[in-house]
């Protein structure tokens, strides 16, 4: 990590001079009220050595450490992990990665990595998927609120453009404010709030042309 996270109590909220969206500011990512009554400074997105990489057995231990945060057995968006995948052992982990590789003609799952720390995953489906959309992502709990999902989605949109995709569908639960904001920050236009078996969902399109 390029800089240490600094927490300070600030009863009145952040000073006026510290405003603006981290993705639009060149210096630092500043947020507040997480936890309430405090603000913190973290490296800006431009300082963070973030990258999207294809899953690799080299980061088995790092991946297990990330997974421990959201909880073994719990679904985490963006990783393409299924209940039947056996990820604890090196062989099981390698088999999961091989399965993902075998599906690479239909889509890609990539890891969001910072200094060999797996901060999240982001998946793209090349074909239209009316239920889940083209792109899904998840950020590990300790890395949330730093602009990482916004950054990762932007990278994926660039990749989608290079595949000549004209527009992508993104779907999130209607009450998932963080995901909705991530999509809107990347140009998502709300098309519809649709009732589904899983509850109401917000459906966005992002135009990749022009
Ligand atoms: C939703 C999620 C991906 C957001 O990741 P993140 O890296 O924290 O998002 P960012 O830091 O890029 O924040 C994007 C915007 O959402 C806002 N936001 C993030 N979490 C929020 C929350 N819990 N409530 C309200 N707004 C939130 C941020 O303030 C930011 O808004 P801004 O641009 O106005 O500052 C993350 O919380 C997560 O992984 N959740 C679980 C999995 C999931 O829901 N995946 C999406 C499935 S569609």
Image (cartoon, grey):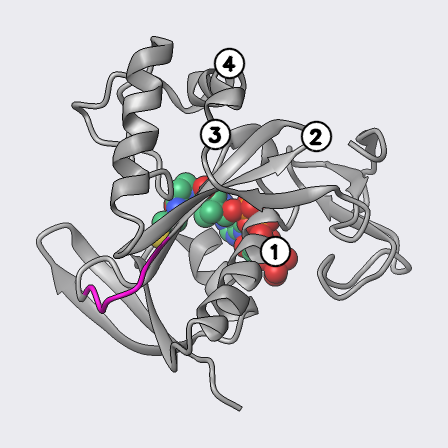
Q: Earlier in the sequence, mark 2 or mark 1?
A: 2
Residue at the image position 45 percent from the left and 74 percent from the top:
188
Query: Which residue is tagged 3?
Result: 56
The secondary structure type at the circle numbered 3 is loop
Q: Earlier in the sequence, mark 2 or mark 3?
A: 3
Image x and y of residue 48, in percent = 76, 43
Give me the C-alpha separation between circle 4 and circle 2.
14 Å
Q: Residues within 10 Å of mark 3 (few under 14, many from 20)?
A: some
Query: Which residue is tagged 4?
Result: 61
Observer-side mark, 4 or 3, equals: 3
Contact, mark 4 vs mark 2 (Cβ under 8 Å): no
Query: Which residue is tagged 1?
Result: 151
- Is 198 displayed left or right of 147 in the figure? left
The magenta stretch spans which residues? Answer: 124-129
Ligand 1 near label 1 (Cβ, under 8 Å)? Answer: yes
Query: Which residue is tagged 2?
Result: 115
Give me the C-alpha separation between circle 4 and circle 3.
11 Å
Q: Relative to residue 187, is residue 84 depicted above or below?
A: above
Give me the C-alpha separation between circle 1 and circle 3.
21 Å
Ligand 1 near label 4 (Cβ, under 8 Å)? Answer: no
Residue at the image position 50 percent from the left and 61 percent from the top:
181
């Amino acid at each position: 990590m390029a800089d240490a996270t600094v927490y300070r109590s600030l009863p009145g909220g952040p000073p006026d001079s510290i405003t603006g969206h981290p993705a639009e500011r060149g210096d630092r990512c500043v947020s507040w009220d997480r936890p309430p009554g405090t603000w913190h400074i973290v490296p800006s997105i431009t300082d963070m050595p973030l990258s999207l990489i294809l899953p690799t057995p080299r980061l088995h231990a790092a991946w297990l450490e990330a997974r421990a945060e959201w909880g073994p057995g719990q679904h985490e968006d963006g990783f393409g992990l299924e209940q039947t995948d056996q990820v604890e052992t090196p062989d099981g982990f390698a088999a999961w990665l091989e399965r993902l590789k075998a599906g690479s003609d239909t889509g890609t799952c990539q890891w969001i990595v910072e200094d060999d720390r797996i901060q999240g995953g982001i998946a793209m489906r090349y074909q239209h998927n009316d239920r889940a959309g083209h792109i899904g992502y998840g950020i590990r709990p300790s890395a949330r609120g730093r602009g990482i999902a916004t950054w990762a989605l932007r990278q994926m949109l660039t990749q989608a453009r290079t595949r000549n995709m004209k527009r992508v569908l993104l779907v999130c639960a209607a009450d998932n404010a963080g995901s909705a904001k991530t999509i809107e920050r990347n140009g998502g236009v709300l098309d519809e709030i649709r009732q589904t078996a899983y509850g109401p969902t917000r459906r966005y399109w992002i135009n990749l042309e022009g």
